[in-house]
Amino acid sequence: MADLAIRNDPQVRPQLVQGGLSLHDVTEKVSSITEARTPRQWYIALAITGLGTAMLLGCLGWLVWNGIGIWGNNQPVGWAWDITNFVFWIGIGHAGTLISAILFLLRQKWRTSINRFAEAMTLFAVLCAGIYPLFHTGRPWRAAYWLLPVPNTALSVWPNFRSPLIWDVFAVSTYLTVSLLFWYVGLVPDLATLRDRAKSIFRARVFGILCLGWRGSARHWNHYEKAYMILAGLSTPLVLSVHSVVSFDFATSILPGWHTTIFPPYFVAGAIFSGFAMVVTLMVVARWIWGLENLVTMKHFENMNKVMLATGTIVGYAYATEFFIAWYSGNPYERFTFMNRAFGPYAWAYWTMVSCNVLSPQLFWFKKIRTSIPAMFVISIVINIGMWFERFVIIVTSLHRDYLPSSWGYFRPTIFDILTFAGTFFLFLFLFVLFTRFLPMIAVAEVKGMMAHEHMHDEVHAGAGAARVQEAH
Amino acid sequence: MQDNFSDKQAATSGAAGLVQIGGTPSQATGKTYWRSLNELTNRPEFRDWVEREFPSTAAQMLDGASRRNVLKLMAASFGLAGLTACRRPVENILPYSRQSEGFVHGKPLYYATAMAHGGAATGLLVEVNEGRPTKVEGLPEHPYSLGAANVFHQGSLLSLYDPDRLRGVRREGRNARWEEFASFVSQEFHQPRLGSGDRLRILSERVISPSLHAVRDHALAAFPNAKWIEYDAVETLENCSAAQAVFGPGVVPRFHYDKADVIVSLDADFLGLDSPTVLSSKQFARRRRVSSEKDGMNRLYVVESQLSTTGAAADHRLRMRSSEVVELARALAAAVAGLSASGPHAKVAAVIAKDLNAHRGRSLVVAGPRQPAEVHALAYAVNQALGNIGQTVTFVQGPAGGNARPQLEALRALAGEMSRGEVERLVILGGNPVYTAPADLEFAANLKKVRNSIYLGQEYDETAAVSKWAVPEAHYLESWGDATAPDGTVSLQQPAIQPLHGGKTQAELIALIANYKDQRGHDILRNYWTAKLGGEKAWLQALHDGMVPNTAYPAATVSVDTKRFVSGTPSTTGVEVVFVPSAKTWDGRYANNGWLQELPEPITKLTWDNAALLSPATARQLGAAQGDLISIERDGRSLNAPVLVQPGQADNSITIALGYGRAQVGRVGKGAGVNAYKIRTTDAWHCGTGFTVRKTGGSYELVQTQEHQSMEGRPLVREATLEEYRREPNFAREAVEAPPLVSLYGDHDYSRGNQWGMAIDLSACTGCSACIVACQAENNIPIVGKDQVSRGREMLWLRVDRYYSGSEEDPQAVSQPVPCMQCENAPCENVCPVAATAHSPEGLNDMAYNRCVGTRYCSNNCPFKVRRFNFFNWHYGTAEVQKMAFNPDVTVRMRGVMEKCTYCVQRIQEKKIEAKAQGRRDLKDGEIQTACQQTCPSEAILFGNINDPNSRVARVKKQNRNYAMLEELNIRPRTTYLAKLRNPNPELEAQHG
């Protein structure tokens, strides 16, 4: 294929939009997904994920009614699947902002086809993540009220600002807010496109409100680009800060296996790793369902796979460093914790983690695997399994055997642990199902901007904006 | 009805007696008091109460003129009147027309009483809050308590409030009225019907109550042909039949462990279950505490089959089958006498004999209650040869007791009579013999042949179910009574509450049957003692003190002919089974007591079950792993029991605790453990050989609170021999290098005021676990049940960790109580997002329960894992009656809340307020005692102000044995430990090596 021949020549950049699509074709392709008759499969998907979400609500209700004893958490394992899942989902939520903000600032044009999708994933993942810290207390109304510095009857009682959990509250809520804004601002021109294409008055009104009166004037574009740039700038440190702060939950404690200075970069790398894996998993499916092959190309996948290869290797390096430092520190408790991870009762979890996270991404060194849709689909899922186990290993194996052997224990999940976790997946997919039906899942305006840039090299940036304006009308 | 009876009794009790449940509505639910508006508003007590409690609304509520108020009160009284239908009406609640002496609302009163357990009385002090006993402590003046109490004393409080107690009389299982029973008794027992009592038998446990003795004498005089049989399922050092056989009826040996430099225990668990009082632990600990390397300490050799608390405390422990101990005793007697001994134990016996001979008059050999008379005779001979008689062991002469024959013989004879239909009327006073009698006596079947059987018991248990009549027995905290300690000291029991379920005492029942001159418990006791003491004043004084002065038994001179007791060579066929009392349910009587069921057994750390303890080698031989079911069989009787592989257990010997597998028991005890009585027969009563054991294939979940037994080489419990300590006095401090570190957030100022601290002496601690139950009672700690314990969710604030060291066959065990360390630089505090756990200026790590949101982060970050989380609402469904056990000074925690040891902050505050009220600025050292400290039989726990250089705890913390666990983490624990010392015999060490 000519396509392959181009890609094999490193001198020539492959086109990010293929199949000779015109600007109009792109708009048509993306918008029609939300405008066509609702396919029956969509209802089936909505029903399944909706039922799963109802199950999640049921599990949470049962939890609130009874207490967190319905989970397997115990003494000494005070945190188990709850915080594992929290960190897992937060990690998933990392790729979105990274793709949107950092790659935007680094002018990686290939991001445009996947950023909307990845940002939506971020939001939904953060929502799923937020369930856990709130509900793992068993009395979420108390946690919600007292973890925030809201005025109360005893005004002198503030949250404890020394606690990393408070830092978490701020870090995660800031991340959620900025991600939401960023996603929404990016949506505005596309919402306007949908408004303009709307056939029913209702649809036009709804999108008209949502697009905040966007008319596509040069002034709008000027403000929009600035705002987008500022938000990208704001989000960039957040990408690093959120998972760093999450890692402080562990790093600032005195528990062997948690008390480690390597955690912030290690967690950020792990989060990007798992986030990209999730984007690949979902994108493969979406691309196949809606036939987006020309917009989301092999180039995109390959790039993402390369990111996974790099971050997976960083994660592997972090595992090795942890072991080395445990030995080098001479701290017997630290040494024991790591030996116990690798050879103790949870060795199966440890080796699952290592094989999934360190070994499986190494396959991406091979171009054939890197560019094979089935292979990357499987590997991306394997990576996310591995990343879940990474959090499980960090949290549970450190807790279950700490300083005093008399207090050692073992954690076993209950059916409610499993159903709740499964429930968050359903919620995540439920939101996705809604998202794909009602909103443009590819940033049309941005893709076209990128096309303009690629196809009309001599045009200035403003010109590209003008092209978009024309198209929008 | 029944209430009438006890009320009148209580009303006559006088100032030193019972505190009435008061008449002010603040104390109990108002719904039972107010009959009409009139009554309500006119009662002066009520007006008084209102005025004191709500001064601002008093006038408004009582002027009566306002229409609003009338309507409000009408509505209230209608509502409340409706509610009275929900409860049995209680007729006679008396107001404080005469308020008890010293009573102040909200402040507890303390009454001296005593609890009989294991055939011995221990003086106790009962805390009564607004008419409810909420805590028992040892009575400091009592010679067998000296202020301490054991697990059973502490746990007995919960038994009082057991919702499954027998509530009222039952006739053949149906509910009946007391009057019905009384008329039955007068028809059936009163003259002339019964004549001389030919076919009347009375079965009780060993009677240690002088007033019951008097009633018994009266009964036996009234019915000369009746027989009174005593039977105890569990024997202790003081009441064991073997000792009685050797020394003669009524002679009680008294051991003075504090005077002995060398102690040899021949299967005597004197620090544990073979001594029902706490005195032996106190005496022993006195010789284990050393303040510097210049002090000496005693040496303890223990010979036993199962690892007991005494064995864990031993300097040398020789593991052998219980039935073989006699051989060692023979070798030891020979060696002490200077004869050359032969046999497998000759070598070790010679070394011990040498040590004993070096401490003539200051050594002690104790034989255990599960050993035959020969071992007791030999122990006596050795003590005599060493000149210990009169020094470390003395004898007193008590009453001979009811049985002319040994208890087991008497019970066998009774069972024979019953089976032949020769018993027409049988009165059983407690003890649940259907459950506890030897299996070969077929007691249940025989009891059914008795035409009229009456059982007085606290529960509707196995015996009650088979008896024609079951009469509720009063708990000791509801009873007027008396009981003797092993040395004869008489303690008086006074009720701290009315009988909750119309219970009767043993004396009351016999008085009714035998038509004794006094019928009510109070009268029986009072008239008995006023006559004895010569007046009302002396009686009241004795009641106040809890003890009758000068009642100790006279000394006895004993001579023993050891040759009379020679038994044959112990049988080595088959497997030996040793029956021991349970450290938690004793003989089964506490099976429905949640505190005790959930208490981790001191050595195995097993909760909610018993198990067949097998040595690792025996288990391997059987191919059985922990939790596998085995069948233990002999003579057609068999028992299926789960295996617990116990390090230190003798090979080919199975130890199994009695007191489990109750068939007829309340909700708590249901399904707990297996019934070892099924294979306990008269010829294998304490210990039997010739059992066959096989694996049956099934398995059973045993739940231990501690699953990991090794310290993994970590310096948690620091231990040395006395010799090593003398060589390196600072070994404990130097075990870990802890350079001074700085804290990120700066330090609190700990230089001023009271700074609370604790020191725990691991040399003195035996691991008995009384502190755990005391803590549970004091701090309203819930139980969670076996399933939740298996998930690691037990709530005990204070736990006792037990670690093994050495080989699997012959391990050494150490116990380490772990409360909250109250770290000065507490890792839990930094991580709490809502500042629910914070430091007090007095150095306490406080929990604000109301603030806690339940993230459990503090627990994760606690290196000692002493924090406990309410995973569920553990108090949900607590029976009304059980709520009375709560300590009103301590919050009952909700689910989702973290809790932990507070150093009994409520006790600290109480004493601080008291001192302030008295105008004192400083608290006296020792004025505040934590619950664990107060009850500790070996005085291993010290608490006080470490800012006061003269306080005991501050001085102890200066000792070189003092160390802080995990101090290298820079957390600066306020609870520190004194390193454990052992004093092994170098000669024996060399032999082992």
Image (cartoon, helix red, strand yellow):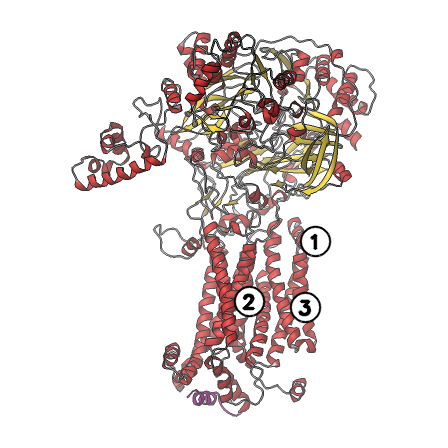
Q: Residues within 10 Å of mark 3 (few under 14, many from 20)?
A: some
Residue where numbered disc 3 is placed: A360
- In the rendered image, the residue lying farthest to the left is B65
- Earlier-in-chain disc, 1 versus 2: 2
Label 3 marks which chain's residue? Answer: A
- Earlier-in-chain disc, 3 versus 2: 2
Q: Reply yes or no: does residue A155 show up in magenta.
A: no
Q: What amino acid type is highlighted by mark number 1? A: Phe
Residue where numbered disc 2 is placed: A92
- Label 3 SS: helix
The correct choice, above or below, for A174 with respect to B143 in the image is below
Which range of residues does the magenta coloring cover?
A458-473
Q: CA distance from mark 1 to mark 2?
A: 29 Å
- Please count the marks in the image: 3
Q: Quadrant of residue A178?
A: bottom left
Tell me if label 3 and label 2 are in contact, CB under 8 Å.
Answer: no
Q: Nearer the viewer, residue B311 or B36?
A: B36
Using the rendered image of the protein, determine whether residue B76 is visible from the camera's viewpoint: yes
Q: Nearer the viewer, residue B643 or B989?
A: B643
- Earlier-in-chain disc, 1 versus 3: 1
Q: Position of residue B253 (x, y in %)?
A: 63, 15
Q: Position of residue B30 (x, y in %)?
A: 32, 34
The quarter of the picture where the C terminus of chain B appears is top right
The quarter of the picture where the N terminus of chain B appears is top left
- Label 2 SS: helix
**What numbered label is drawn on residue A343?**
1
Q: Position of residue B34 (x, y in %)?
A: 28, 32
